[in-house]
Amino acid sequence: MTMQYPEFIWHNGGIKPWRDATAHVMSHAIHYGSSVFEGVRSYDTHQGPAIFRLQDHLKRMYGSARIYELPMPYDIAQLTAACHQVLNANHYGEAYLRPFAFRGLGGFGLNADCPTETSVAAWKMGQYLGHDVVATGIDAMVSSWNRVAPNTIPAGAKAGGNYLSGQLIAREARRLGFGEGIALASTGLLSEGAGENIFLVFNGKLHTTPVSAALLNGITRDTLITLARDHGIEVVERDMPREYLYLCDELFMCGTAAEITPIKSVDGKAVGSGQPGPLTGRIQELFFGLFKGTTPDRYHWLEPLRDV
Ligand SMILES: Cc1ncc(COP(=O)(O)O)c(C=O)c1O
């Protein structure tokens, strides 16, 4: 599938035509993965276009920058405005937004103080893991690659370099004919998908792996935990062994890109009935209901698109 690039990008303080928003090949980040970023979605909601949990995403991005001592030249309010400007400039309602900050030109030492460059792009993204998979589900596999150990690279920072791990997991899965890969942590226990958190269903309860299992503390994960608990569905955050993937009644992945994607099988073994299950359907209904208006937005997660 060819990528449709947006007409305009916000780069280092203003909106530019797509072709002008470039970086130099000698930028630090290109060589060493020294960047932090977010993936955020905007939706055409029942009340018009709105960005979902933008402030939580930006807070996480500034946290990732703090971990890597990456000075942020703009504050959260300025980057918020940039996100709104990019959507408006491209006339997008529903889109995927990519706030991004990276070490630019300024030396090749690992500790070089390169000035930070900042950008926000947006593009049209359908269902990340394939056509209609949110309804039909995917077949997944356990990756031969483990996630990083906790005292090596911080999994809780959304940094460019972390996504080398995600690429190994995702590419192996696609090469072997699966929709996505699920990784184990260095402990041998379950971690998460290449770019998604995971939820298992046992006896009508949701079980998800804890943040100590080398995963990104997903904002979708938090959304689902909150919605489930608010609607009387029990959620347990716990370490789980690999074989629970084969024993659970239902299984799904979640993330900004993947939204809520059911998993029909793991390693060729059917999950439950081999079809998306009823609790997965209920969680999808609650989540997508935020945008349709059937789930009340109690926490003001929807940030209406503004002319800024
Ligand atoms: C490695 C990884 N885990 C989990 C997630 C899900 O996080 P979120 O729900 O905040 O998008 C993502 C996506 O950003 C990710 O890249």
Image: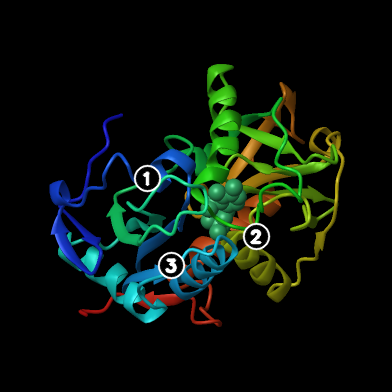
The answer to whether the residues at label 3 and label 1 have Cβ atoms under 8 Å apart is no
- In this rendered view, identify the residue nearer to me: 61 or 250: 61
Q: Alpha carbon of mark 3 to alpha carbon of mark 1: how far?
A: 16 Å
The residue positioned 53% from the left and 26% from the top of the image is 171
The residue positioned 49% from the left and 82% from the top of the image is 300
The residue positioned 58% from the left and 65% from the top of the image is 286
Residue denoted by label 1: 126
Amino acid at circle 2 = Asn
Q: Alpha carbon of mark 2 to alpha carbon of mark 1: how far?
A: 23 Å
Confirm or reject: label 2 Cβ below 8 Å from ligand 1.
Answer: yes
Mark 2 vs 3, N-terminal side: 2
Amino acid at circle 3 = Phe
Question: Horizontal and vertical percent for residue 301?
Answer: 49, 76
Q: Nearer the viewer, mark 2 or mark 1?
A: 2
Mark 3 vs 1, N-terminal side: 1
| Residue 185 appears in the figure | yes
Residues packed near mark 3 inside 10 Å, few (<14), some (14 to 19) or many (20 plus): many
The image shows residue 72, relative to residue 130, as above or below, that is: below
Name the mark on residue 291.
3
| Residue 47 appears in the figure | no
Q: SS for tag 1?
A: loop
Residue denoted by label 2: 217
Question: Horizontal and vertical percent for residue 283?
Answer: 63, 59
> Is 25 left or right of 264, judged from the image as shown?
left
